[in-house]
Each structure stands twice: as structure tokens, then as C-alpha cells.
Image (cartoon, rainbow, N blue to C red):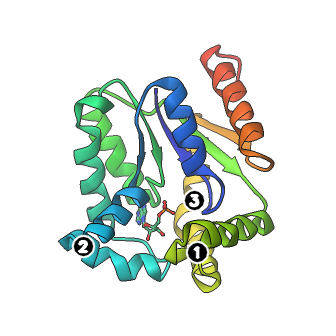
Amino acid sequence: MRAIFLGPPGSGKGTQAKLLAERMGVPAISTGDMLREAVRLETPLGLRAKAIMEAGELVPDDVVIGLIRERISRPDARGGFLLDGFPRTLPQVAALDRLLAGNGESLDAVINLLVPEATLVERMVGRAAIEGRSDDRPETVRERLRVYSEKTAPLIDHYGGRGIRIDVDGSGSIEEVSARIDRAAAMRAGGRS
Ligand code: AMP
């Protein structure tokens, strides 16, 4: 299974991608986690990405495309993977398609998490308190939501047009959302959606 989790910041993509990846025995790949690790280690990439991430803006496409190219070519991703936070722009969509096509592969599904904006803000503010993520400050949260609407939301229609998008209600508890994802994935596997 090669799938993407799509949804605004705070929609639970990361949590749900990790849970589904565990159940399916494939890696969950998060460009946000990879970038945060680079920032923590103060690598040249991390030093470049830090200010961009703290401002709630997107790291340049070529940078994240390079990270994904390297990551999905590793042996543990041969049998499939779940992407969380990539692609986020239409050029990233095209790059991913090219990377997969180069190996004779394509995407199986795009799981689109739907969550009302008020819930997103609440979750991110809560996460800032628990995890201390520096981009979960209120001003940055607003900017990340704006960047999402401008750059990432167009991907919803794009993948809908390709017939691989599965919309899942992302409100409620982690367990409720995870059960909905399982049902949607089972329906898709059974060819009934
Ligand atoms: P996330 O953990 O997915 O919310 O990502 C945290 C931050 O990392 C984002 O706000 C961006 O600054 C950066 N980032 C993560 N993934 C991407 C991507 N695919 N394209 C550009 N920037 C990204």
C-alpha cells in the first residue's frame, strides 16, 4: 500500500499515519519529523529550515522532494509506505508521481482527513502545551492554516479527480478516527467505494 495522508495542520495526520502504518507493517514517513530532526541536529538543512518552519511557511519544494526521494528508496519502503505531510504543493505531487513511475509504481490511496477549523486550532494549541512545538504558537498556527488553504488545499480536488481520494471524518477521538480509516480502507480494498 502506497498512500498519503492529506489534511490541514492539526487534523491528526501524523498520529493516524503512524497507527495505520503499524497495522499495515509499512513505514510512516513524515517530512515534518525529518525536518524537525535536522533542526535538532543543526545540520546544514536544519539550519536552513528552522526559521521557515518557525514562521509557519513551507520549506522549498526541491528540499523536501530530495528528502522523500532518498527516504522512499530505502529497503524498508519497498513494499509500501504512508506519507504524512508530503506532498503539500502541486509541484510536490508531480515530483512524487515521477519518483513512483520511475519504479513502475503509483499511489493507491489518498486519505483526506476532514476537521472543522475550530477543532484544528484547539488541537494545535493543546499540542503546543504538551509537546512544546515552536510552530504551534497562535500566530504561527494561523499562518500555517493560511498556507494550507493556499498551497495544499488544491491537492484535495486534484486527487479527487484521479479517483483515489478517500474522505474521512477526522473529528472525535484518536480511536474513533482510526476505526473510520480502517473501515474506509477495507471498503477500498473490497472495491466497494
Ligand atoms: P508538519 O509536521 O507536517 O506539520 O510540518 C512542519 C513544518 O515543516 C511545516 O510547517 C513546514 O514548514 C515544513 N514541512 C513539512 N513538510 C513539508 C513539505 N512537504 N513541504 C514544505 N514544507 C514542509
Q: Secondary structure at mark 2?
A: loop
Q: Amino acid at mark 1?
A: Asp
Residue at image x 66%, y 20%?
186
Q: Secondary structure at mark 1?
A: helix
Q: Earlier in the sequence, mark 2 or mark 3?
A: 2
Of residues 164 and 24, the one nearer the viewer is 24
Of residues 188 and 124, the one nearer the viewer is 124
Q: Which residue is mark 3?
A: 154
Residue at image x 58%, y 74%?
136
Q: Amino acid at mark 2?
A: Glu
Q: Position of residue 107 (x, y in %)?
A: 44, 33
Q: Is residue 130 left or right of residue 58?
A: right
- Whole-number angstrom distance, CA of label 1 to CA of label 2: 20 Å
Q: Amino acid at mark 3?
A: Pro
Query: Which callout, 2 or 3, points to the residue nearer the camera?
Result: 2
The image quarter containing residue 62 is bottom left
The residue sitting at the left extreme is 44
Q: Which residue is mark 2?
A: 42
- For the residues labelled 3 and 1, say whether their Cβ atoms are less than 8 Å apart: no
The image quarter containing residue 102 is top left
Position above or below: 17 against 105:
below
- Crowding at label 1, few (<14), some or many (≥20) Cα neighbours within 10 Å? many
Q: Which residue is mark 1?
A: 136
Residue at image x 63%, y 52%?
12
- Whole-number angstrom distance, CA of label 2 to CA of label 3: 33 Å
Q: Which mark is residue 31?
A: none
Q: Quadrant of ligand 1?
A: bottom left
Q: Is residue 170 left or right of residue 55?
A: right
Q: Earlier in the sequence, mark 3 or mark 1?
A: 1
